[in-house]
């Protein structure tokens, strides 16, 4: 049945062609890129095009609903009742806080005793808005690195536009001023760490041929106070085609050392550690994540690791004595072993113990692991309720065995607890407020069957009294990349702007993510990328088959790699969706390696400059799979000019090509600031979210009625 929908005065039919059954490769000629001129990010012609599209989109969204949603979302983001999350260093807890009066934020601190109070007394160290006003630059606070063990100096990281590039400026916490002639760097993608009061480790843009093709530093140097940055002593250099190099310094008394990570690509690295005065490479599998803590070496391999006659499975966590390992005595203790349904999500060292956050069928738990006389012992300290998330991290591993534990769900706001490894008691320190009536909604986990028979879990948040007649507007979110698991989380914006507006919210745990460990991720790498999209489409079909929604009422939303995901829903499965929201996306997979930090993701997607790779990459390059004769669902693209990770040009080019092909119902909006997050402050975030939900409601609720 053909139904008429309308957006911006243009009618469009509901999808009647099933594009997944046709040859998407016969789309746009990949040898022609008529919109490459839009890759000039700050070019006058490009920005004129952006301004025109922004004006057109704002005109389409200038409705009472949009204004109401924006206001209600901003209330959530600016709420003074939300939890001020902290970093503990010494006797102080540090926090960066943004609200209506301080849109760029305050960097402040308080004591643990004060933090326990409902209204702590905060000592404001730096007012980012005041600095911006005084200097004429709307700085975005990126972070701060404090000097151990006095904590009286900090390296403040400030981005001029919210992107990944920032300045480093030394700050005196006693005087609340930036240090004259202190450690200061120009804007660049930088990593920096204190060695001592007068020395830092730094990787940055030192000039010609010092950055990788992925746009990250090639060199780590030791920079001494009072000397020119370019004269800093070279510690380690990596090849130009590696992703980049990062370094840190371990200040633990008796274990002082430089730690270097030569990141070859996103999933492989060489790990180097200072030992007996030399920087030595650890003899470990390249696909392992590694940490050194006191006398312990933790190894988390992504593939099976054969050591003698023993096979340590991919996704396990192994611990060895660092000194014995460096001396050639390799004895590995298995502190976590995965199975087909259980995976390690993260771990965190306290002073003397490990905190393990794990998933079993996307149900989370936290365990503490301690070393006894002869073996490691493990016991649970946090068990999530069904359809909720619990995670833990050390409070200050330099100081002791205290930790923070957070539990949260789709309709349950965060609760922050404080505990110690040697105690079974967990103290509730903070609880976030509810921004919508969670009791009205039920949270369920379901499994869809993908094309190859794989069972794909997904979460569904819906009204408790929902009638399954296919009439509900539903919004399906996914990511499916880089081994990142998507677990239950609370969002006041989703609650207020979608659930309370009568919608169903769904999160798909597709392959490419980390919900079931490395194998779940690797199943959708490179030539197998389509499996992630088949999984997502299977969830969409399952929602329809179960009577939750129908194609004209089902939308999808995703950003970054998730933007590539929903871009493929647009071009491969247009018949399944009534609207698509595509944020800060990858879309042109032929040129992605030449744009911003794209070269760093070759291990995930493949290299389009290699002919054999391009043959499979082109099957999931939405920019090249558009066809003028296909009816596509309405789409909103959202990006940021200052995004120096993915870049705005992919969304620009996709929107421009669709408009050029005469495809209706294409909206594009580009925020100037915000970097890859798309927003530099709460008001911009509220604008972005309100735009997405107003668009989705117009097409999935109003037009589909």
Image (tube, rainbow, N blue to C red):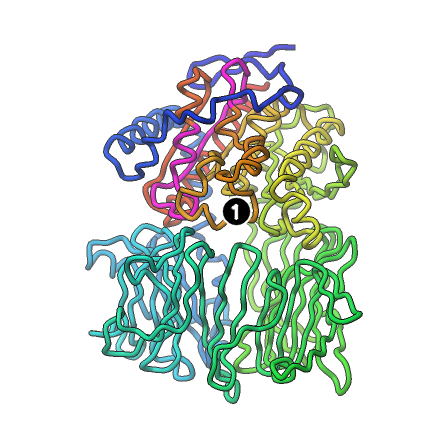
Task: Please give left or right for residue 85 compared with residue 345 in the image.
Answer: left
Asked whether the viewer can see residue 557, the reply is no
Asked whether the viewer can see residue 646, the reply is yes
Query: What is the quadrant of the C terminus in the image?
Result: top right
Res 498 → quadrant: top right
Residue positioned 54% across, 16% down in the render: 631
The verdict on residue 634 being magenta is yes
Res 232 → quadrant: bottom left
**Label 1 residue SS:** helix
Residue positioned 31% across, 65% down in the render: 168
Of the pair 637 and 185, the residue shown nearer to us = 185
Query: How many numbered discs, if any?
Result: 1
Of the pair 582 and 40, the residue shown nearer to us = 40
| Magenta residue span | 626-654
Query: What is the quadrant of the N terminus in the image?
Result: top right
Res 130 → quadrant: bottom left
Of the pair 534 and 16, the residue shown nearer to us = 534
Within 10 Å of the Cα at label 1, are there few (<14), some (14-19), or many (20+) other Cα atoms?
some
Task: Please give left or right for residue 323 compared with residue 164 in the image.
Answer: right
Residue positioned 65% across, 84% down in the render: 324
In the rendered image, residue 167, in percent from the top left (x then y), is placed at 30, 61
The verdict on residue 403 being magenta is no
Q: Which residue is mark 1?
A: 602
In the rendered image, residue 314, in percent from the top left (x then y), is placed at 71, 60
């Amino acid at each position: 049945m053909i139904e008429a929908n309308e957006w911006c005065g243009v009618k469009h039919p509901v999808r009647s062609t099933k594009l997944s059954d046709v040859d998407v490769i016969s789309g746009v000629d990949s040898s022609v890129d008529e919109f490459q001129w839009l890759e000039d990010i700050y070019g006058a012609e490009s920005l004129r095009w952006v301004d025109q599209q922004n004006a057109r989109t704002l005109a389409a969204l200038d409705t009472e609903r949009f204004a109401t949603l924006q206001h209600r979302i901003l209330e959530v983001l600016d709420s003074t009742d939300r939890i001020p999350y902290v970093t503990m260093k010494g006797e102080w807890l540090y926090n960066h806080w943004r609200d209506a009066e301080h849109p760029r934020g305050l960097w402040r601190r308080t004591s643990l005793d004060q933090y326990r109070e409902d209204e702590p007394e905060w000592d404001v160290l730096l007012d980012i808005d005041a600095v911006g006003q005084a200097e004429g630059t709307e700085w975005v606070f990126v972070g701060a690195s404090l000097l151990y063990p006095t904590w009286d100096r900090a390296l403040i990281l400030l981005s001029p536009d919210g992107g990944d590039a920032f300045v480093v400026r030394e700050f005196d916490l006693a005087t609340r001023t930036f240090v004259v002639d202190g450690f200061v760097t120009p804007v660049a993608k930088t990593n920096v760490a204190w060695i001592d009061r007068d020395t830092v480790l730094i990787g940055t843009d030192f000039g010609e041929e010092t950055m990788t093709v992925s746009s990250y530093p090639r060199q780590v140097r030791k920079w001494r106070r009072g000397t020119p940055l370019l004269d800093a002593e070279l510690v380690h250099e990596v090849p130009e085609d590696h992703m980049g190099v990062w370094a840190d310094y371990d200040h633990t008394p008796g274990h002082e050392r430089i730690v270097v990570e030569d990141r070859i690509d996103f999933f492989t690295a060489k790990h180097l550690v200072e030992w007996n005065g030399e920087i030595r490479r650890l003899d470990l599998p390249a696909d392992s994540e590694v940490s050194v803590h006191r006398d312990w070496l933790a190894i988390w391999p992504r593939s099976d690791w054969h050591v003698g006659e023993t096979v340590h499975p991919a996704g396990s966590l192994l611990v060895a004595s660092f000194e014995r390992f460096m001396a050639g005595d390799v004895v590995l203790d298995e502190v976590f072993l995965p199975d087909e349904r259980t995976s390690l999500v993260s771990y965190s060292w306290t002073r003397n113990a490990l905190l393990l956050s794990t998933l079993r069928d996307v149900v989370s738990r936290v365990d503490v692991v301690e070393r006894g006389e002869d073996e490691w012992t493990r016991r649970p300290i946090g068990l999530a309720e069904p359809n909720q998330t619990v995670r833990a991290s050390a409070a200050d591993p330099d100081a002791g065995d205290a930790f923070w534990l957070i539990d949260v769900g789709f309709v349950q706001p965060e609760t922050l607890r404080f505990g110690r490894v040697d105690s079974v008691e967990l103290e509730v320190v903070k609880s976030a407020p509810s921004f919508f009536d969670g009791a009205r909604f039920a949270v369920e986990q379901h499994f869809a069957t993908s094309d190859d028979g794989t069972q794909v879990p997904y979460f569904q948040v819906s009204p408790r009294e929902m009638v399954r007649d296919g009439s509900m507007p539903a919004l399906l979110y996914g990511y499916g990349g880089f081994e990142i698991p998507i677990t239950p989380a609370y969002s006041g914006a989703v609650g207020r702007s979608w659930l309370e507006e009568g919608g169903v919210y769904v999160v798909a745990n597709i392959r490419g993510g980390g919900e079931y460990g490395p194998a779940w991720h690797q199943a959708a790498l490179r030539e197998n990328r389509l499996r992630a999209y088949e999984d997502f489409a299977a969830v969409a079909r399952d929602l329809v088959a179960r009577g939750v929604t129908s194609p004209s009422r089902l939308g999808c939303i995703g950003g970054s790699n998730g933007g590539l995901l929903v871009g493929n829903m647009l071009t491969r499965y247009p018949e399944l969706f009534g609207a698509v929201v595509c944020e800060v996306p990858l879309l042109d997979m032929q040129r992605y390696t030449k744009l911003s930090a794209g070269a760093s993701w070759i291990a995930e997607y493949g290299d389009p400059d290699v002919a054999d790779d391009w043959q499979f990459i082109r099957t999931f390059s939405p920019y090249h799979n558009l066809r003028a004769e296909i009816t596509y669902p309405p789409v909103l693209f959202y990006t940021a000019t200052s995004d120096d990770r993915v870049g705005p040009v992919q969304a620009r080019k996709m929107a421009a090509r669709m408009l050029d092909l005469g495809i209706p119902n294409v909206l594009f909006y580009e925020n100037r600031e915000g970097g890859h997050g798309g927003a530099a402050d709460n008001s911009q975030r509220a604008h972005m979210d309100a735009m997405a939900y107003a668009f989705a409601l117009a097409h999935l609720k109003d037009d589909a009625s």
